[in-house]
Each structure stands twice: as C-alpha cells, then as structure tokens.
Image: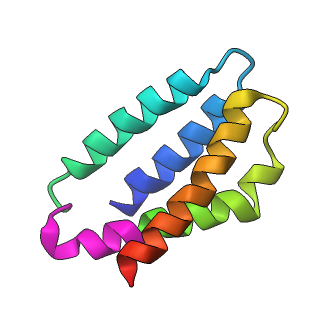
Amino acid sequence: MYDAVFGQHWFIYHLADTKNATIENVDQQRKLWFEKIKSLPNVRSSNEKLLKLALLERAAAGLNLDALTVNQKRKAAKYVVELARKDIIHLIEELR
C-alpha cells in the first residue's frame, strides 16, 4: 500500500512539473491513482488509518521537500503544492 502511495506522490509531482501539464491532467491522474490504490487487496476498512497516515506522510514530504523541486511558476505545479496543503489539513482532521 505504501509503495503505491509513494509512486502516486512522485508521479503527480513529476507530471505537474512538465511543461504542458494542466490542472485537469493532475486531477484526472490523482483520481485514477486513488481508485487503483483503494482497490488494492490490502486496502480495506480495517487498515484505512494506515492509508491515511501514508497519504499524510507523503503530503508533508511534498511540502517539506518536493515543493522546492518543482517550478511553481507552472500552474499545475503550484496546484499540486496547494493540494498538498489541503490534503494535510483534511487528513489531520480525519485522523483525530
């Protein structure tokens, strides 16, 4: 599960940093990745908290390091960084 979350994280940051990426591309890809992650055999309600923790860890890493490696002049890259902030707030609230 964590490997899939890690892969999704890196894919989205690299996609967002490409020249022709759009916000729509990012949203479509995020949706596809999350659908696949949630369909993994070891992702079920009994370990939903672990999935949320993995997503939180990656979102925090995104703000602490990955946001510094993308060109935030690109709309999609700036959008991904903003999504990371929103994800962190949302996941912390859910995990309380």
Query: Which residue lies at the image location 71% right of the left edge and 24% below the top edge?
Result: 18
Q: Quadrant of the N terminus?
A: bottom left
Residue 47 vertical placement versus 26 (above, below) = below
Q: How did the renderer colour the structure?
A: rainbow
Q: Is residue 41 magenta?
A: no
Q: Nearer the viewer, residue 83 or 63?
A: 83
Where residue 58 sits, quadrant-wise, is bottom right
Q: Is residue 42 left or right of residue 85?
A: left
Where residue 74 sits, quadrant-wise, is top right
- Outermost residue, top direction? 20
Q: Is residue 45 magenta?
A: yes
Q: Nearer the viewer, residue 47 or 83?
A: 83
Q: Quadrant of the C terminus?
A: bottom left
Residue 57 in the image: state x and y as whole percent: 53, 69
Query: Which residue lies at the image location 66% right of the left edge and 49% below the top edge?
Result: 82
Where residue 43 sits, quadrant-wise, is bottom left
Residue 51 in the image: state x and y as whole percent: 33, 66
Residue 88 in the image: state x and y as whole percent: 54, 66
Q: Number of marks in the image?
A: 0
Residue 28 in the image: state x and y as whole percent: 42, 27
Q: Is residue 85 left or right of residue 31?
A: right
Q: Is residue 54 left or right of residue 38?
A: right
Residue 19 vertical placement versus 76 (above, below) = above
- Magenta range is 43-53
Query: Which residue lies at the image location 60% right of the left edge and 55% below the top edge?
Result: 84
Residue 3 vertical placement versus 7 (above, below) = below
Query: Which residue lies at the image location 37% right of the left edge and 39% below the top edge?
Result: 33
Query: Principal SS element in the magenta part?
Result: helix
